[in-house]
């Protein structure tokens, strides 16, 4: 191998390493922002967030609606009258993800 081939291989390794690091950072940022949106939604609606579980995989209400850019949580909340509700919360828009603060809640019956 000559020096040009080694340089090209090192460039590719560095490029893909940087790409993977950026992708990892973006995923962490997306879920961090979604968590903040969820906490703000609960506070604004005077709910106490008892439980939240990642619901980005599998079916459920609006299962086909959830785009790859949405973050979905199955939540259990308690309202001011101490009644509990469960449902799925869709955070972010289908087009821009959590760059939008859009929230759709589908309560279980």
Image (cartoon, helix red, strand yellow):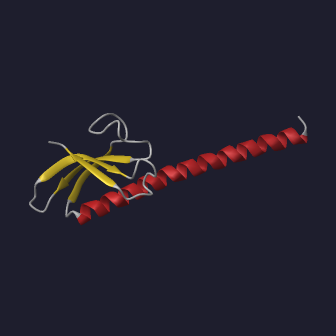
How many marks are shown on the rendered structure?
A: 0
Residue 104: percent from the left, percent from the top?
Answer: 29, 51
Q: Quadrant of residue 43?
A: bottom left
Residue 75: percent from the left, percent from the top?
Answer: 25, 49
Look at 71% across and 47% down and name the residue there. 14
Q: Residue furthest right?
A: 2
Is the C terminus in the top left, top right, bottom left or bottom right quadrant? Answer: top left
Look at 25% across and 60% down and name the residue there. 42
Is the N terminus in the top left, top right, bottom left or bottom right quadrant? Answer: top right
Look at 14% across and 59% down and name the residue there. 79
User: In the image, 95: left or right of 109?
Assistant: right
Look at 60% across and 46% down and name the residue there. 20
Residue 108: percent from the left, percent from the top?
Answer: 18, 43
User: In the image, 24: left or right of 79?
Assistant: right
Q: Residue furthest front?
A: 95
Q: Quadrant of residue 6?
A: top right
- For the residue pair 92 and 50, the one nearer the viewer reads as 92
In the image, residue 43 above or below residue 92: below
User: In the image, 4: left or right of 91?
Assistant: right
- For the residue pair 18 and 56, the one nearer the viewer reads as 56
In the image, residue 18 above or below residue 80: above
Residue 78: percent from the left, percent from the top?
Answer: 16, 56
């Amino acid at each position: 191998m000559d020096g040009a081939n080694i340089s090209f291989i090192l460039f590719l390794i560095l490029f893909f390493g940087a790409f993977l690091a950026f992708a990892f950072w973006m995923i962490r940022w997306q879920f961090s922002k979604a968590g903040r949106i969820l906490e703000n939604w609960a506070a604004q609606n005077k709910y106490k967030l008892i439980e939240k579980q990642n619901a980005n995989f599998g079916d459920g209400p609006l299962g086909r609606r959830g785009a790859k850019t949405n973050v979905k949580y199955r939540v259990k909340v308690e309202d001011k009258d101490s009644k509990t509700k469960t449902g799925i919360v869709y955070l972010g828009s289908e087009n821009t993800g959590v760059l939008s603060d859009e929230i759709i809640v589908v309560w279980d019956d």
